[in-house]
Amino acid sequence: GTQLDMLMSAHPETNGQTNRLNQGIKDYIFNLRQADQSNWVEHVDVLEFCYMATIHLATGFSPLNLSIGKEVLTPIALLYILY
């Protein structure tokens, strides 16, 4: 009852997960940009950490959790622990 759907790398929009991932990354970049829109590249490492530390609905885990086997403590999480 399953059907194999071959995807072409030139057409990532055919995959709903890829499309959602790309939109999420666009949202992250949009929120990082400044008024002059020239320094967003300086913040890509922060963007990557935020993405990797975010729990994803598809798995219920963050990519970092799946990679290293435990959740990382983010600055926000530390604030909740301390207060």
Image (cartoon, rainbow, N blue to C red):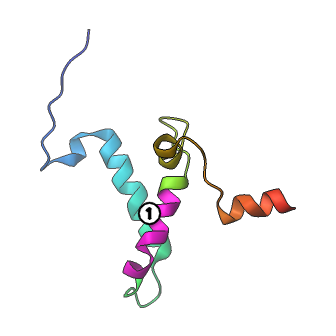
Is residue 41 depicted above or below 60 in this figure? below
Q: Position of residue 74 (x, y in %)?
A: 64, 61
Pointer 1: what residue?
Answer: 48
Q: In this image, 76 relative to 9: left or right?
A: right
Q: Quadrant of the N terminus?
A: top left
Q: Is residue 41 left or right of residue 54?
A: left
* Main secondary structure found in the magenta portion: helix
- In this picture, residue 9 sits left or right of residue 59: left
Question: Percent x, y for residue 80?
Answer: 79, 58
- Which one is nearer the viewer's eye here, 22 or 42? 42
Residue at image x 50%, y 49%? 64
Left or right relative to 24: residue 65: right
Image position of 25 with respect to 12: above or below = below
Q: Is residue 31 magenta?
A: no
Q: Position of residue 47 (x, y in %)?
A: 46, 67
Amino acid type at circle 1 is Glu
- In this view, 40 is above or below 14: below
List the single residue furthest toward the front: 68
**Segment colored magenta:** 40-51
Label total for image: 1
- Give the structural element (helix, strand or loop) at label 1: helix
- In the rendered image, which quarter is residue 77 located in? bottom right
Q: Is residue 50 magenta?
A: yes
| Of residues 74 and 25, the one drawn nearer to the viewer in this rendering | 74
Asked if 2 appears above or below 14 in the picture, the reply is: above
Label 1 Cα neighbours within 10 Å, binned few <14 / some 14-19 / many ≥20: few
